[in-house]
Image: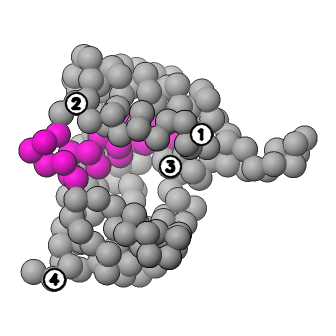
Amino acid sequence: MGSAIKHFKTITRHRHQVIKHCFKAGIFWQGLKHDLSKYSPTEFIPGAKYYQGTRSPNEAEREIYGYSLAWMHHKGRNCHHFEYWTDYNPKTKKLEPVEMPLKYVKEMFCDRVAASKIYLGDKYTNEEPLKYFLKAKGNRMIHPKTSELLEKLLTMLRDEGEDKTFEYIKKLK
């Protein structure tokens, strides 16, 4: 089977998993709209070209060129990525993280859990999304409150499981 078909199946399986999670989190409409840009030529063609099945193709593109055009396109159109939420602070004149609206933090949680499930397959446990988050914790530009909430939700997933975590997320206002 060609890499384009494999990539299509992977991103579609991921998207369907996110839709299920978003439904549990009370943000079903966001789930339906999730990651539609991955089907655009700008993201899909490099995704198929660098497809490996065990990690994001953006990582392979980044290793070759030092950046990923597909990722830059993706993060600029999908508000559930903390990288979308940076702006120039008018006081410091520096690029700084902005606190994410709650509905996008919820979707980011759903996305991270789904990605872990898709890429890890049978090796997935509820601890994996937190481990992945903590691995790069000191190296990302994310608003402290956004980071704190995401880590809290991922820790809850590890300690209390999906059902309790999604119940909690659904009630967050």
Marks 1 & 4, CB-CB < 8 Å contact? no
Q: Which residue is mark 2?
A: 126
- Tell me the residue at 61%/29% (across/down): 144
Q: Which residues are magenta?
A: 103-124
Q: Mark 1: which secondary structure?
A: loop
Q: Check the image and name the residue furthest to the right.
A: 91
* Above or below for 19 versus 148: below
Q: At label 3, which amino acid type do we have?
A: His
Identify the mark nearer the N-term, 1 or 4.
4
Q: At label 2, which amino acid type do we have?
A: Asn
Q: At label 1, which amino acid type do we have?
A: Ile
Give how far apart the Cα atoms at labels 2 and 3 are.
21 Å
Q: Nearer the viewer, mark 4 or mark 3?
A: 4
* Above or below for 164 versus 87: above
- Tell me the residue at 56%/32% (across/down): 146
Q: Mark 2: which secondary structure?
A: loop
Q: Which residue is mark 3?
A: 81
Q: At label 4, which amino acid type do we have?
A: Gly
The quarter in which the N terminus is drawn is bottom left
Give how far apart the Cα atoms at labels 1 and 3 are.
10 Å
